[in-house]
Image (cartoon, rainbow, N blue to C red):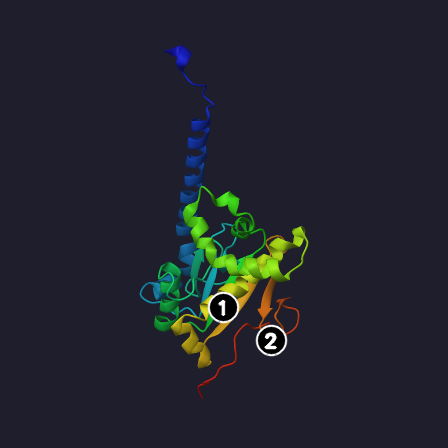
């Protein structure tokens, strides 16, 4: 009956319109890529069609604001990218899922020379680690972020920082924690010992575009571009000639 009809601007109709607009944006983007971008780089895509040889693996957050290829100005084929909530690297053996599989493949099959673990400012995952009550309706996210508990404990026991700086310190400590987890993976540990692999811990600031990198010798994060590049790689014990 007409009297029971919902208003034309109902919430469901607005959601449907918004969803359609979002999909149209993606499709239009693909069509522009195919028409304008692909022809200019067709030789590159032809080269990549049957093989890849990335020299670096980039492990970062699934946050939509973080685009590794844009930040590093990389071409297709340059980066082997793995993304997840909180740029987590589970310790070897605890969860043989997508991240562990990607690491093993990147190191053992592709022979990447660098692995970068990159956190970022205003990270929702780190906010949730600080306020776990927000995850009560997201049990899988809550379980996943237990891999960041070590960073939370380090900050709580040692930081002594004010509330407005806690998120930034936690974000950095989480990167350090995930680097420690990364070193438990046998393929990574072996290549590190041989001096054939280098690991890096970065934190990207969305608003300023600055990146701070972890310096394992000093235990500090320093801005990239300000002096020598900070390195998180341990000394090789069995360097190859």
Q: Is residue 154 visible?
A: yes
Residue 189, image x, y percentages: 43, 75
Q: Residue most toward the left?
A: 50
N-terminal label among 1 and 2: 1
Q: Residue at x 41, y 78 (%)?
A: 190
Give residue 186's quadrant in the image. Answer: bottom left
Residue closest to the eye, 76 or 108:
108
Residue closest to the eye, 29 or 210:
210
The residue singled out by tag 1 in the image is 180
Residue 25, image x, y percentages: 45, 41
Residue closest to the eye, 141 or 63:
141
Side of 224 relative to 28 (left or right): right
Circle 1 crowding by C-alpha within 10 Å: few under 14, some 14–19, many from 20: some
- Quick one: quadrant of the N terminus? top left
Q: Residue 122 shows which numbered tag? A: none
Q: Residue at x 37, y 65 (%)?
A: 93
Residue 176, image x, y percentages: 54, 65
The residue singled out by tag 2 in the image is 217
Give residue 121's quadrant in the image. Answer: bottom right
Q: CA distance from mark 1 to mark 2?
A: 14 Å
- Quick one: quadrant of the C terminus? bottom left
């Amino acid at each position: 009956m007409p009297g029971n009809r919902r208003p034309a601007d109902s919430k469901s109709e607005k959601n449907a319109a918004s969803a359609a607009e979002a999909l149209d944006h993606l499709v239009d983007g693909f069509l522009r890529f195919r028409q304008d971008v692909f022809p200019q780089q067709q030789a590159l895509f032809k080269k990549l069609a049957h093989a890849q040889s990335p020299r670096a693996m980039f492990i970062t957050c699934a946050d939509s604001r973080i685009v590794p290829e844009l930040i590093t100005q990389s071409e297709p084929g340059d980066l082997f990218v793995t993304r997840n909530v909180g740029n987590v690297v589970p310790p070897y053996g605890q969860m043989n899922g997508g991240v562990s599989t990607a690491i093993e493949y990147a190191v053992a099959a592709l022979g990447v020379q660098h692995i970068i673990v990159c956190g970022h400012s205003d990270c929702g995952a780190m906010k949730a680690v600080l306020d776990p009550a927000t995850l009560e309706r997201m049990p899988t996210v809550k379980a996943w972020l237990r891999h960041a508990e070590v960073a939370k404990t380090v900050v709580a026991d040692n930081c002594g920082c004010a509330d407005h700086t806690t998120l930034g310190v936690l974000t950095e400590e989480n990167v350090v924690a995930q680097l420690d987890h990364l070193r438990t993976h046998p393929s990574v540990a072996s290549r590190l010992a041989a001096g054939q692999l280098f690991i890096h811990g970065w934190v990207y600031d969305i608003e300023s575009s600055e990146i701070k990198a972890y310096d394992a010798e000093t235990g500090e994060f320093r801005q990239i571009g300000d002096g020598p590049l900070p390195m998180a790689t341990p000394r090789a014990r069995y360097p190859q000639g």
